[in-house]
Image (cartoon, rainbow, N blue to C red):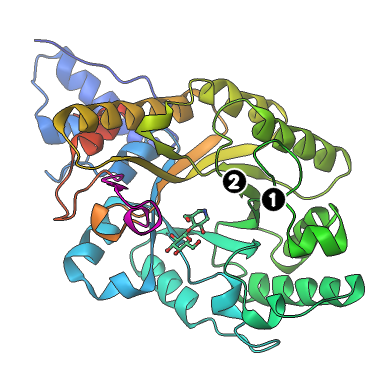
Amino acid sequence: MHVTTRTGTRSRTRLRLAGALAAALVAVGVAAGPAAQAGEGHGKPATLADLAERHGRYFGSATDNPELTDSAYTALLGSEFDMITPGNGMKWYATEPRQGVFDWSQGDEIVNLARKNHQRVRAHTLVWHSQLPGWLTDREWTAGELRAVLKKHIFAEARHYRGKVYSWDVVNEAFNEDGTYRDTVFYRTLGPDYIADALRWAHQADPHAKLYLNDYNIEAVGPKSDAYFALAKDLKARGVPLDGIGLQAHLALQYGYPTTLEDNLRRFSRLGLDTALTEVDVRMLLPADEAKLATQAQWYADMTKACLAVRRCVGITVWDYTDKYSWIPAFFPGQGAALPWDEQLAPKPAYFAIQEALGGR
Ligand code: 9MR
């Protein structure tokens, strides 16, 4: 009999006992069936969340309010994942549509659903140059005015979700590709220290949430991830409350795999920071074919293994789980098929590759 042993860290005693029991059964010659191998005990196949938890990690998905009326979709969303990110519902345009008038309805709907499903929430996002309300973008602000507006928004939102979310993407997409600061209304008006201020305010409003900076194209070592490394080091040295760096990981087959991902995760770890893959998808030029889907599966597996290899990489979130609700086709015409489940909610090779990389099957 061929026996595969898993060596991942098991954080919970229950799982350690299950592992010891399985080993004992193997030792006395009792063949472990698929359910026993999955360690779930009730014959239910292990979900990605179950598998990730054996490594002390989470496996999450983004979601968005309009999709929540699709019951086949919400069934999988509620069962396969243990971390949820609202794709839009907590952004500034949604939460403060008029100055000083707050609307938590979309974020609350997702937080309540996650609670019902015993899932945690990666909250997204407090400060971003995009999806801002018109009242904020349609006029000029003095530094004093904008600072007050920013502080009020962060306090109101982080307070509202205090104790209900695992983490906040406090500042999203602050750098350009060359590692210079992105020219946003916040940077232009307040200078680079708006980032430290935002982190401090978020920490005051919700002292237990993990506070992240989050960006795309920072998976590999390069000018943009170097900028985050330098900023994180500086913020830590100044005692600014920063807990982690979110690597969005919106990858595209035609641009190649970020082969330095693991080294990159490791250097942030060494700074004493958590890391997470926060918005993973792997798009391709359509139509999809078997070869592209196989390469995509390999990339998902490689990302998963890179995260498992670095102790402080705490988890992985896909930017929604099904091609049915992916943002890609609308933003990159002619591209898509980026997620582990297809438009009919059937698992693709990428799903099985993630499952295997997590030690399942
Ligand atoms: O998934 C979001 C999509 O529904 C919105 O239309 C889009 C608008 O920019 O934002 C998407 O989410 C983005 C995330 O908030 C930040 N990183 C990039 C994501 C994809 O654009």
Q: Position of residue 349 (x, y in %)?
A: 19, 34
Q: Residue at x 89, y 74 (%)?
A: 142
Residue 67 falls left or right of residue 24: right
Dot 2 corresponds to which residue? 215
Image quadrant containing the C terminus: top left
For label 2, the SS is strand
Dot 1 corresponds to which residue? 174
Label 1: few (<14), some or many (≥20) within 10 Å? many
The image quarter containing residue 90 is: bottom right
Dot 1 or dot 2: first in sequence order is 1
For label 1, the SS is loop
Residue at the front extreme?
Answer: 334
State yes or no: discs 1 and 2 in contact (Cβ < 8 Å).
yes
**Relative height, residue 44 to residue 152 (above, below):** above
Q: CA distance from mark 1 to mark 2?
A: 7 Å
Residue stretch in magenta:
327-339
